[in-house]
Image (cartoon, helix red, strand yellow):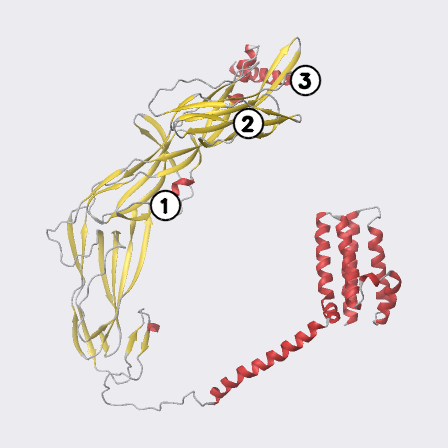
Amino acid sequence: MKKYFFKIGFLIPTAIIAWLAIMPVKSAAQEPQFTASAKSVVVVGERFQLQYRFTAEGQGFRGPNIADFDVLNGPSTSTSSSVQIINGQVSREVSYTFSYILSARREGSFTIPPATINFNGKQYTSNPVTVQVHAGGQTTPGGQGSSSQQGSQQKSSSEEVDVFLRAEVNNSSPFIGEQMIISYKLYFNNQIAGHDGFQKISSFPGFWVKNLFPNQREIPTTTENFRGKQYNVAEVRRFAIFPQRAGPIEIQPQESEITVRLRTESKRKTSDPFFDSFFNDPFFSSRYSDISKKLSSNSLTINVKPHPTKDRPENFSGAVGKFTLQSQIDKTEVKANEPISIKLTVTGSGNIELFDLPRIEFPRDFEVFDPETKSDIKVTTSGVSGNRVFEYLVIPRNPGNFKIRPIEFSSFDPSTGNYSVQKTPEYNITVERGDGTSSVVTYSGTVRQEGIQIIGSDIRHIKLPPYQLRPIGLYFFRSNGYYLALIVPFLLFVAVLIIWRKEMKKRRNVELMKNLKATKIARKRLKLASNFQKQGKESEFYIEISRASWGYLSDKLSIPVSELSMDNVRVRLSAKGLQEETISQFIETLNQTEFARFAPGAKEENMERIYNGALEIITKIEKELK
C-alpha cells in the first residue's frame, strides 16, 4: 500500500508541471516594478540584508555606491516566479532579486542610493533606502524599508550563523622550554565554502614555534558536544610551542576569515492555496548565499615555571624533554698528526633544536676543530622529536697515551620534575710516533676526508729522523705549458675576429641573405598555413600558401614579388638551371592554389593536397639550386 501511495505522490506534481507546460501562458502586462528594501534601524556591527527586486527579466543591473557600510557579500542573484490561473488563462510573473549582506560601520543616519536596471531598452531606477544606525546595546525595531509588491509577497528567512573558533592547549602550566601542543578547532553547524584565512595563524610572542600541519590539504571533521550542543569540529591548525621565559604569557586571540554558505527560503503567495503549498516546498524554494565571517579565537594565559634550582647540574644547557646520549669513536690507536673522529648523538623528544652541544675536555696535545652538527627532526601531530649529531675532529700532535674523559649531557624531564645526567665511556687513546711522512693537516669545516688540507710549507712541525728526501719537482712557470697558455688566448681572439668580419661582410649582402633565408621563411609560412588548416580557416590558409610560394621564389631569384608572374617564372627558373619537370610542377602548384580557393568539393582534402604539394616542390627546388 505504501508503494502505491508513493507512486501517486510522485505522479501528481509531475502531472501538474506537465499540465502547466502545455497551458497557454500569458505574461503579466503591467509595468515592471524595481524596489529596494532593508532594515530601517540597525546597531553598529550588525549584519543586515539589502535587496533589490525587479518584476521582469531585466539586464545590466548596476548596484549603488555603498560608502557608509561594509559590503560583506553581494550582489547575489536569485529568481522567483508565480503562476495564476483565471478562467483557464495562465499568467506568470517573474522577479529577480539582487541581495547584499552589509555591516553597519558607525552610528548615524545613512541613505543608500538607488540602483538601476535595463528592460526592453528602458532604464529603471529603484527607490533609495534610509537606514538608522544606533550604538551597540540599544534595542532596534525590526521595521523594514518601504517596498512595493503587487500580486505576491516574498519572505526570506536565513539560517543562523553558528560558527566559532576555539583554541586549546594541552598544558597551561609548563616549564621553560617544555613542549606544548596548541590547536585551533573550528566548530560549525553551517556549510563552510572557504577557509584560506587559517594560514595566517602563526604569531606567538614569547614562544619558539613549530607548525605541525605544514602541508595540510584535507581537514578531517569529527563531531563533538560542546556546552550541550552538537557541532561539527575541524582542527584547522596545530603547533608545538616552547616557552622561552618564566612567568605568565598571554596568547592573544587569533583572527581569521571564512566563507559561510547559508540557505534562504523564498515564499510566494498566489490566489490558489494549493499552488502555495506546492511551490513553497523546500525543494523548490531553497536559495543559497555566501557571506564572509570574521572569527576570533579565545585568548589563553600560560603560566610558565622556571627550572628548579635544586640538584641542577652545572653543565645544564637548556635541554628539556626525554633524551638519550650515545657516543662513537672511529679509532683509539693512531700515529701523530693523524685525525680522530668522535661522534655524539642525542635522541629524543622535546626542544631538541634549542639546546647547546655537550662540552668535551680534550688533552692539550690534541688540536680540536669546531664540530659539525647534523639534525634529523621529525614533526608529527604529536609533537617534535628526532636526533642531533655532533661530530668532532681532533688531531694528536705528539706521541703518548691520552685519555678523553667521559662526556656529560644534562637534561630536564618535565614529566618527573628531575634532572638527568648521562655520561659516555672514557676513551684511552694511544698515539705512536709518526714516520715523518704524515703532513700537518688543517680542518676546513667538515669531518669528511676531503675537508682536510695540507698547511703551506712556511710553517711545519719539526720532523724527526729517519728522513725521506725526494725531488721537489718542476714548476709551471717558464714551462712549455706556461708559454702555450699565453699564446692560445691570442690565437683564439684572432680566429674569432676573422670569422666575425666574414659574417658581417656576408650580412651586408642583402640579396645573399635573402637567398640563404628563403627556405627558412618559406617553411615558417607553411607552418602558419598548417595551423590555419587545423583551425578550418580556409581563406587564411590559401593566403599563407601563396605567400610561401611566391616569397620563396622572390628571395631565391632576388626579384621583387611585384615583378614575378606566371609568364616569366619559367624563364627565370630556367636561367637558374632547374629541370623542366621541376619548373612545370612549381607552376602547376601555383595554379592549383588559385583554383582550389574557389573550387567546390571537400575543402579539407583540397587544403591537405595543396599543402603537401607546396612543401614538396619547395624542397625539390632547394635541392636542385644547391
- Disc 3 marks which amino acid? Ile
Q: Nearer the viewer, residue 97 or 10?
A: 97
Residue labelled with disc 1:
213
Contact flag, marks 2 and 1 (Cβ < 8 Å): no
Q: Quadrant of the C terminus?
A: bottom right
Q: CA distance from mark 3 to mark 2?
A: 37 Å
Residue 27 rendering spot, x and y as whole percentages: 65, 17
| Horizontal side, residue 575 vs residue 227: left or right | right
Q: Which mark is residue 22?
A: 3
Label 2 sits on what residue type? Ala
Identified at 51% across, 86% down, the residue is 484
* Mark 2 to mark 1 CA distance (whole Å): 46 Å
Q: Position of residue 400 (x, y in %)?
A: 17, 78
Task: Name the residue rendered at 48%, 19% in the picture.
Answer: 145
**Residue 121 image-quadrant placement:** top right
Q: Nearer the viewer, residue 200 or 386?
A: 200
User: What's the CA distance linking mark 1 and mark 3?
Assistant: 59 Å
Which is more N-terminal, label 1 or label 2?
A: 2
Q: Point out the frontmost of discs 2 and 1.
A: 2
| Crowdedness near tag 3: few (<14), some (14–19) or many (≥20) residues, C-alpha within 10 Å | few
Q: Residue 128, percent across and down?
A: 51, 23
Relative to 338, residue 470 above or below? below
Q: Residue at left 35%, top 25%?
A: 135
Q: Residue 198: horizontal and vertical position, in percent?
A: 38, 40
Q: Is residue 168 above or below residue 327?
A: above
Instruction: Looking at this view, name the residue that lies furthest to the right.
Output: 567
Camera-near label (3 vs 2) is 2
Crowding near pointer 2: few (<14 within 10 Å), some, many (20+)?
some
The first of marks 3 and 2 along the sequence is: 3
Q: Which residue is mark 2?
A: 115
